[in-house]
Amino acid sequence: MSDCLFCKIVAGSIPSETVYEDEHCRVFRDIQPKAPVHLLMIPKKHIENLDDLKPEDAAVASHMLLTIPRIAKQQGLDDGYRVVTNNGEGGGQEVFHLHFHILGGGALHSL
Ligand code: 5GP
Ligand code: ZN
């Protein structure tokens, strides 16, 4: 997806403060943090959001979920953290490349 912001971050044509990367995903700091630690985890493959996940994406999706706790520990989020994914315009999604917000490092109001 040549016009996708997060695909450009995966490709390195837009810089990001990356804290983790492997064959399936990349984790970088949100440019407008809403918590002391605010990371975005994205698949390297262009998937729009949860609605766009296909059965063949199961390995990537489970890999990302299983990797989140490891990243949270690495980032010192020992007290806990929040994982959010906005899905579709009505869900507040602005960038249409699947991403998990990982938020923590301070008190978060309950949902
Ligand atoms: P959404 O609203 O789609 O769930 O979240 C998109 C997130 O991407 C927002 O929190 C926004 O601050 C972040 N964002 C938008 N553009 C950039 C960018 O160029 N670099 C980084 N690191 N984050 C971005
Ligand atoms: Zn993309």
Image (spheres, grey):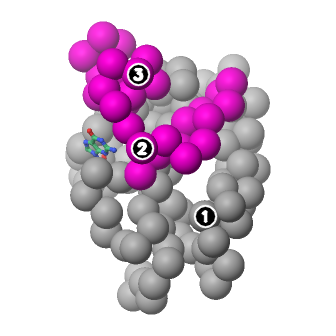
Left or right of 41 in this view: 7: left
The residue shown at (68%, 24%) is 23
Q: Which residue is mark 2?
A: 17
Range of residues picked out in magenta: 1-29
Label 3's element? loop
Residue 16 colored magenta?
yes
Upstream in sequence: badge 2 or badge 1: 2
Left or right of 30 in this view: 10: right
The residue shown at (60%, 42%) is 20
Q: Residue 104: image x %, image y %?
A: 50, 74
Residue type indicated by callout 1: Gln
**Looking at this view, is 59 or 30 the one in front?**
30
Upstream in sequence: badge 3 or badge 1: 3
Q: Establish whether ligand 1 lies closer than 8 Å to the Cβ of label 2.
A: yes
In this view of the protein, can residue 8 be seen by the observer? yes
Q: Which residue is mark 3?
A: 12
* Res 75 label: 1
Residue type indicated by callout 2: Glu
The N terminus lies in quadrant: top left
The C terminus lies in quadrant: bottom left
